[in-house]
Amino acid sequence: MGLLDKRFENSNIVITKMDDLLNWARLSSLWYMQFGLACCAIEMMATGASHYDLDRFGAMPRATPRQADVMLVTGTVSIKMAERIKRLYDQMAEPRYVISMGSCANCGGPYWEHGYHVLKGVDRVIPVDVYIPGCPPRPEALLEGLIKLQEKIRKSSLVELKSHKSPSKADQHMAG
Amino acid sequence: MSPQEILNKLTEKFADAIVEAKVEGVLEPYAKVKVESIREISSLMRDDSDLQFDTLMCLSGMDYGKGILGVVYNLGSIAKKHKFTLKIEISVEAANVSSVESVWRTADWHEREAFDLFGIVFTDHPDLRRILLPDDWEGYPLRKDYQVQEFYHGMKVPY
C-alpha cells in the first residue's frame, strides 16, 4: 500500500493527495451487488465463502444496488434479464464498476450462435471494466479480476471520474 | 396393464380416432390420434377404472418439418404403474388443439411452453400467454424455419 505508512509519526496529521485518498478508500471497500445469474454465480459464492474469503479485499455483498459499488455479472445474460441488469446498473451510485465474469457475460459463450434468448455480451447494455474469461472461471480468476479492478481504480483521478461514462477499449483490462 | 391392453381399450371406444399405433419394439408405446378427439380420449384415459392415467408426466411441442407440428402427451398412472404416450399432428396453418388443462392441471404451464416456443394454440386454455420469452417477442424459436429477430428493445440479438 505505502500510502499512509509512516505518516502518523508524532501528530495526527496525514498529508496525501485527494486522488490517492479517494482511490484508496474506493478500492479498499468494493461492495458488490448480491445477485447471480447462472453457474458462474456458484463460483462467486465459493469465492465469497471462507476458503477464498473475498471479504479480505474489502468486498462484501450488498442486497441493493443503492449501496453497491461494483456489479459482478456472473453468468448467462438472457435478453429478458438484460433490461433488468440495465435498470439495476442505473440504480447504482457513481462511481460504479462492472466486472463481467465468464464467457457468457463476455460474449455469449456457448450460446453465441444458436442462443436466440441470450445477449451476446453484457457490454451491449452496460459498460464493463474487467472481463474474466473462463467457463466458469475459478475463484482465483475472480479474485484476480477484482485485483485488476483495484489496480484500475488506483490509477484513476477525480478529473477522469467526472467524465466516467463508458470506458474506452483502451481502459479495459483483461484478467487472467 | 400392458401397452397392448391399453391400446385395445382405446380402440374399443375410439376406433375411428386412432390414426396409427405402435406398442412393440419402441421405447415408448404410443398411439397417434385425431386432433379433434384428444380431449375426449384424455378424459377417458384419466377416468377409466382400468387405465387411471392420473398423471400427465410431460407435454411436448414438436416440429416435424414440412409444415407439420405436433404435440406429444406422456401419460403415467401412479395407481396402476403403467404408462402410455399419445401423439397428435397438426398443420402450421391450423395449429389449434383443445387444451387438456381441464383434465390434468399440469398441462397449464406445459401448454403455455408449447405455445411460447412452437406457436401451437391451445383452445379453451385459461391463461394462454408466453411463459419463458418476453410477451412482445417475435416468432416461435423452436420451429424449424425460425429466423431470429435483429433487434429486441434496441439490443442486438444475433452475435
Image: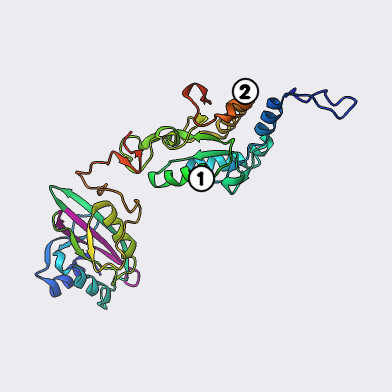
Of all residues, the one furthest to the left in this rendering is B16
Considering the image in quadrants, where does the N terminus of chain A appear?
A: top right
Nearer to me, B17 or A2: A2
Q: Which residue is mark 2?
A: A155
Task: Give me the residue at 51% from left, 45% from top.
Answer: A88
> Helix, strand, or loop for circle 2?
loop
Nearer to me, B151 or B111: B151
The image position of residue A70, as x and y in percent, is 57, 38
**Residue A49 is inside the magenta segment:** no
Rendered view: B2 above or below B89: below
Q: Which residue is mark 1?
A: A88
The image position of residue A10, as x and y in percent, is 90, 25
Quadrant housing residue B89: bottom left
Q: Work out whether residue B131 can be spotted.
A: yes
Colouring method of the image = rainbow
Instruction: Please state which amino acid type lies under the numbered disc 2.
Output: Lys
Rendered view: A134 above or below B52: above
Compared across the picture, whether B27 is left or right of A176 comes to left
The image position of residue B38, as x and y in percent, is 19, 67
For the residues beneath circles 1 and 2, the answer to whether they share a chain is: yes
Crowd around label 2: few <14 · some 14–19 · many ≥20 (10 Å):
few
Nearer to me, B116 or A54: B116
Instruction: Please state which amino acid type lies under the numbered disc 1.
Output: Leu
* Range drawn in magenta: B69-92
